[in-house]
Image: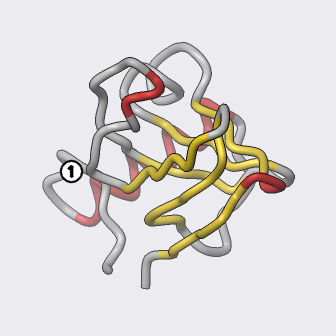
Amino acid sequence: MDFFVPSATSPQQAEAIFSSIATHISAPEQAKRVYKLSWQHEGEVCTCEIGQPLPDVFRVDETVLAIFDCGDEYQICTPNRGAIKFEPVHASKSTVTDVQFFN
């Protein structure tokens, strides 16, 4: 899968949005960009994928815009969780069961 950010109309705009979100949450430089992530959260497996809604357990109907590798955890960003306000969703690497990257 080639890198994209939902709603971006060009590769340049996708890069700008991704960079802006990374700056907002103080994410480190990303050697690889995460496309899909699965992890254990409160006893169930959650899966987030760029362009898809957050899992129901988070009780918000928001699209995943970006997933950042932030050392010992991943941070999953939606418009209101990480991209514009509030905290992103946190997934500890010790609970991760699968990570898929963009090409």
Q: What is the total number of numbered labels drawn onto the structure image? A: 1
Which residue is the extreme one toward the left?
Answer: 9
Which residue is the extreme one toward the bottom?
Answer: 103
The image quarter containing residue 9 is bottom left
Looking at the rendered image, the quarter that the N terminus falls into is bottom left
Residue at the image point whose x is 36% and y is 27% from the top = 79
| Residue 41 drawn at (x, y percent) | 64, 38
The three-letter amino acid code for the residue at tag 1 is Ala
Drawn side of residue 93 relative to residue 45, left or right: right
Q: Is residue 80 above or below residue 38?
A: above
Drawn side of residue 2 relative to residue 36, left or right: left
Q: Is residue 65 above or below residue 103?
A: above
The image quarter containing residue 103 is bottom left
Drawn side of residue 78 relative to residue 37, left or right: left
Q: Give the color scheme: rainbow, by chain, secondary structure or one colour.
A: secondary structure
Drawn side of residue 7 relative to residue 53, left or right: left
Which residue is the extreme one toward the top?
Answer: 86
| Residue 94 drawn at (x, y percent) | 83, 55
Q: Is residue 69 above or below residue 62?
A: below
Residue highlighted by disc 1: 8
Could you say whether the residue bearing mark 1 is in a helix, strand or loop?
loop
**Closer to us: 99 or 56:** 56
Residue at the image point whose x is 32% and y is 78% from the top = 2
The image quarter containing residue 96 is bottom right
Residue at the image point whose x is 53% and y is 65% from the top = 34
**Crowding at mark 1 (Cα within 10 Å: few <14, some 14-19, many 20+):** some
Residue at the image point whose x is 55% and y is 49% from the top = 45
